[in-house]
């Protein structure tokens, strides 16, 4: 097996985004991604409402992490 010293990533690479189908495809992807985010957020609001009771418990349990006392302090002092 021979060693190639040339960098295969040094060659030019171009993506053409000029066609009308590409514009429609990007628009469809944006709509689907927006729906995905909207659905996830509205589902959380419908199921749990605005009661986020697990957040402080989760933060208080992060005592052994690299962030140390910061999340624990936030978990103890959330309004």
Image (spheres, rainbow, N blue to C red):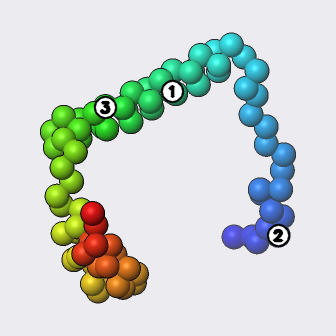
How far from the left and from the top, in percent, is residue 78?
A: 28, 67
Which mark is on residue 5? 2
- Classify residue 27 as left or right of residue 57: right
Residue 75 horizontal/vertical position (percent):
27, 72
Q: Which residue does the numbered mark 3 point to in the structure image?
A: 39
Residue at 77 percent of width and 56 percent of height: 9
Residue visible at 23% across and 41% down in the picture: 44
Q: State left or right for residue 19 relative to residue 60.
A: right
Image location (x, y in percent) of residue 14: 79, 37
Q: Quadrant of residue 70?
A: bottom left
Q: Which mark is residue 51?
A: none
Task: Nearest to the eye among marks 1 and 2: give it.
Answer: 1
As displayed, is residue 15 above or below residue 67?
A: above
> Toward which corner of the image does residue 4 lie, by quadrant?
bottom right
Circle 2 crowding by C-alpha within 10 Å: few under 14, some 14–19, many from 20: few
Asked if the residue under mark 3 is in contact with the one under mark 1, i.e. CB atoms within 8 Å, the reply is no
User: Split into 4 quadrants, where in the image is the C terminus?
Assistant: bottom left
For marks 1 and 3, give the one nearer the viewer: 3
Helix or strand or loop: what does disc 1 sit on?
helix
Q: CA distance from mark 3 to mark 2?
A: 50 Å
Who comes first in sequence, dot 1 or dot 3? 1
CB contact under 8 Å: marks 1 and 2: no
Q: Which residue is mark 1?
A: 29
- The residue sitting at 22% across, 67% down in the picture is 56
């Amino acid at each position: 097996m021979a060693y190639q010293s040339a960098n295969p990533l040094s060659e030019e690479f171009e993506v053409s985004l000029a066609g009308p189908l590409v514009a429609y495809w990007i628009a469809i992807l944006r709509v689907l991604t927006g729906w995905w985010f909207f659905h996830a957020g509205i589902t959380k609001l419908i199921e749990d409402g605005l009661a986020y009771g697990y957040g402080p418990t989760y933060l208080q349990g992060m005592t052994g992490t690299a962030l140390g006392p910061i999340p624990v302090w936030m978990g103890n002092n959330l309004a």
